[in-house]
């Protein structure tokens, strides 16, 4: 590798680090906003001023839910148009991810109230960690951790919304979509679509652990749905242990 190549690689690494830090900063801001919502909307005092403020926050969250959903749909269309033109869609995908995160935060807060806020206090840092993995770590680990994280979220929905709820079914659907995408990547040398921008994984990427993560996540949700009770609670810890095992494996693989 000559000097110019090293400089180009260094500049790319600096850009990736800056992008990852932006996601971390956004997560810190979102955590702060969640703490305010928890104080003034979930645990508000029974005074006229506090009640009015809680009602205003509820209306704002309801508006945010629909605005972010519309923004997500617009970003998806923008991504498709951008890719058809043969360009990169990094900005558009980032905006879609932000819109999806805001929609989930608003929806979960409005539907699940206190338990939802408690879960979001963990979910938001997990999103920031996934961003760090995406930009600074191995993409194989990112996909494995992403599908496992959706599995954890699905288990939470089974406990708090029921096995047949829209939220549980949505989590299962996301895992299935990710599994299909992994199979597509496996058959096309890691490329999601033609062009340099579509090369999501290296050609020599390994897929067994990624696909196994899909199977484990679906199996955990299925077991929790049919058995329920305390077992679904312990399955959450089992999925977290699986995520830790993935972290150890991919870290050792990098050495």
Image (spheres, helix red, strand yellow):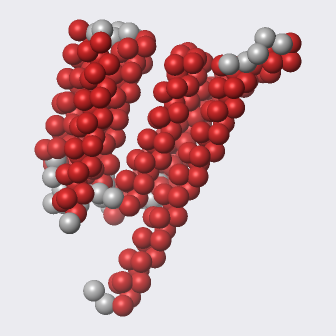
Q: Residue at x 51, y 30 (%)?
A: 120
- Left or right of 152, for residue 30: right
Of 252 and 147, the residue lying toward us: 252
Q: Examine the rendering and report whether any part of residue 33 can be seen.
A: yes
Q: Examine the rendering and report whether any part of residue 55 can be seen.
A: no
Q: Residue at x 69, y 32 (%)?
A: 36
Vertical side of 87 occupied by 227: above or below: above
Of 62 and 183, the residue lying toward us: 62
Query: Looking at the picture, how far across and down is residue 153, in whole percent?
Result: 38, 27
Of 37 and 4, the residue lying toward us: 37
Q: Residue at x 38, y 61 (%)?
A: 136
State the image quarter where residue 235 is shown: top left
Viewport quadrant of the C terminus = bottom left
Which residue is farthest right?
48
Of 143 and 200, the residue lying toward us: 143
Vertical side of 124 occupied by 91: above or below: below
Which residue is farthest left?
208
Query: Looking at the picture, how far across and down is residue 30, in whole percent?
Result: 61, 40
Viewport quadrant of the N terminus = bottom left
State the image quarter where residue 224 is shown: top left
Query: Looking at the picture, how far across and down is residue 103, in whole percent?
Result: 56, 30
Q: How many marks?
A: 0
State the image quarter where residue 64 is shown: top right
Q: Residue at x 65, y 26 (%)?
A: 38
Query: Looking at the picture, how far across and down is residue 70, in whole percent?
Result: 59, 31
Vertical side of 185 occupied by 227: above or below: above
């Amino acid at each position: 590798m000559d000097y110019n190549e090293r400089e180009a690689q260094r500049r790319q690494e600096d850009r990736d680090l800056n992008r990852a830090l932006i996601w971390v900063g956004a997560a810190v801001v979102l955590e702060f906003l969640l703490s305010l919502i928890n104080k003034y909307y979930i645990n508000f005092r029974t005074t006229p001023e506090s009640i009015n403020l809680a009602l205003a926050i509820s209306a704002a969250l309801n508006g945010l839910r629909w605005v972010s959903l519309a923004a997500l749909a617009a970003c998806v269309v923008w991504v498709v148009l951008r890719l058809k033109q043969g360009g990169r869609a990094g900005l558009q995908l980032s905006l879609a991810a932000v819109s999806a995160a805001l929609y989930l935060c608003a929806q979960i807060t409005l539907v699940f109230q206190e338990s939802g806020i408690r879960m979001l206090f963990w979910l938001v840092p997990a999103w920031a960690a996934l961003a760090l993995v995406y930009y600074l770590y191995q993409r194989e680990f990112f996909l494995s951790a992403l599908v496992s994280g959706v599995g954890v979220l699905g288990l939470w929905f089974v406990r708090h919304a029921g096995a047949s709820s829209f939220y549980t079914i949505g989590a299962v659907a996301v895992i299935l979509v990710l599994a299909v995408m992994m199979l597509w990547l496996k058959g096309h040398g890691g490329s999601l679509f033609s062009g340099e921008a579509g090369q999501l994984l290296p050609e020599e990427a390994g897929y067994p652990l990624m696909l196994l993560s899909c199977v484990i996540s679906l199996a955990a949700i299925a077991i929790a749905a049919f058995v329920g009770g305390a077992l679904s609670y312990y399955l959450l810890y089992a999925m977290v242990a699986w995520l830790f095992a993935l972290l150890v494996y991919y870290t050792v693989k990098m050495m």
